[in-house]
Amino acid sequence: MIPVNARRRQVPCWQRELAQAIRDPAELLQELALDSALLPIVWPTQFPLRVPRGFVAKMRKGDPDDPLLRQVWPLAAELIPVPGFVTDPVGDQAAQAVPGVLHKYQGRALLIVTGACAVHCRYCFRREFPYAEAQSDLRDWRSALDYLAGDTSIREVILSGGDPLSLSNQRLGTLLAGLQRIPHLVRLRIHSRLPIVLPERVDEGLLALLASTRLQPILVVHANHPREIDAAVRTALQRFRAIGVTLLNQSVLLRGVNDEVERLAELSEALFTAGVLPYYLHLLDRVRGAAHYEVNETEASVIMKALRERLPGYLLPRLVREQPGQLAKTPVWE
Ligand SMILES: *Cc1c(COP(=O)(O)O)cnc(C)c1O
Ligand code: SF4
């Protein structure tokens, strides 16, 4: 009867939010009441600015050093080459079993299901990952599913990217149907920043998928600063909890964002209030363009010691580093 409106209504609300993410640096500065003099003279063309409006709303106006802004704002420092900072810091290329499947650790295989993210985090270790090549075969997931089916030692499949929850529920449903048919798989782990930066993503369709899978679902979200976890995020996470999803968080230790004991303690507390346990605190992967975020191992250990004296053991994330060729994440501190 009303085809035009009907079509519009079919686009889920979260996809509209995603499409409306801020990409124009001048607009972001204006939103935050910041001086346009902060615009860099040279602008990175690869991996451009992208940040959902809901995440921008959590930033402090008028503060160029806001820790949430700092995660997404490309500083001129990105363009300065620093020895040791490379395009593939964790050896992902060498670990591809078939295109889009990383199999580094025993019993777990990681699927790069998309290159798309709702937010572009400047410190992202996959900021230069050649997604186009990795995904060529993933259109129907065939080669990935064949690989998983052929290795009975794999018990857990990890959906990663990019952000796996930037796929539509329909695409995720197709993938899940394929995964469920592989008898030796028992756990489904999703690594996503979307529940934090775009909580609208947690809709009925997604919850129905996770509630109905025979695989045991685990969601590892990615928050770095306590202010990222507001009421909307808590509500979204609560909905996962209500259907029995185990919730964990991983963070990256970032200079100028969360390199303070106080902040990390607040983050752990905020996560627990939202029903999430801290899992990993990663030392920065040394990807090209991210050197200005690095907190070194000595500084990190000092922070962890003080943090341990502040928090119950279950709120202490494990400080780790990813080293190419290793069979697990490497603990940095005890
Ligand atoms: C980090 C990672 C995992 C998961 O490691 P856990 O210690 O189980 O969290 C699995 N596969 C790859 C390729 C990884 O990089
Ligand atoms: S959401 Fe995750 S994968 Fe996407 S840019 Fe940020 S850190 Fe990288």
Image (cartoon, rainbow, N blue to C red):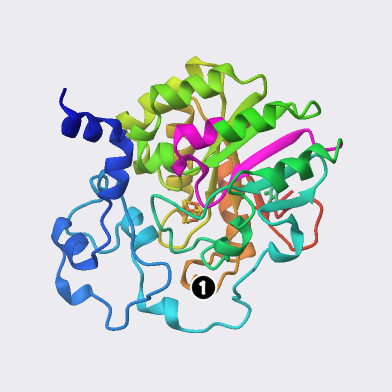
Who is closer to the viewer here, 140 or 159?
Answer: 140
Is 63 positioned to the left or the right of 15 in the image?
A: left
Is 211 positioned to the left or the right of 70 in the image?
A: right
Q: Is residue 191 above or below residue 119?
A: above
- State which quadrant residue 94 falls in: bottom right
- The residue tagged 1 is 291
Whether disc 1's CB lies below 8 Å from ligand 2 is answered no
- Residue 209 can be seen, yes or no: yes
Relative image position of residue 50 (x, y in whole percent): 33, 58
Q: Is residue 242 above or below residue 163?
A: above
Is 111 positioned to the left or the right of 205 in the image?
A: right
Is 55 positioned to the left or the right of 212 in the image?
A: left
Q: Secondary structure at mark 1?
A: helix
The quadrant of the rendering that contains the N terminus is top left
Highlighted magenta segment, given as a residue range: 153-173
Relative image position of residue 227 (x, y in whole percent): 34, 42
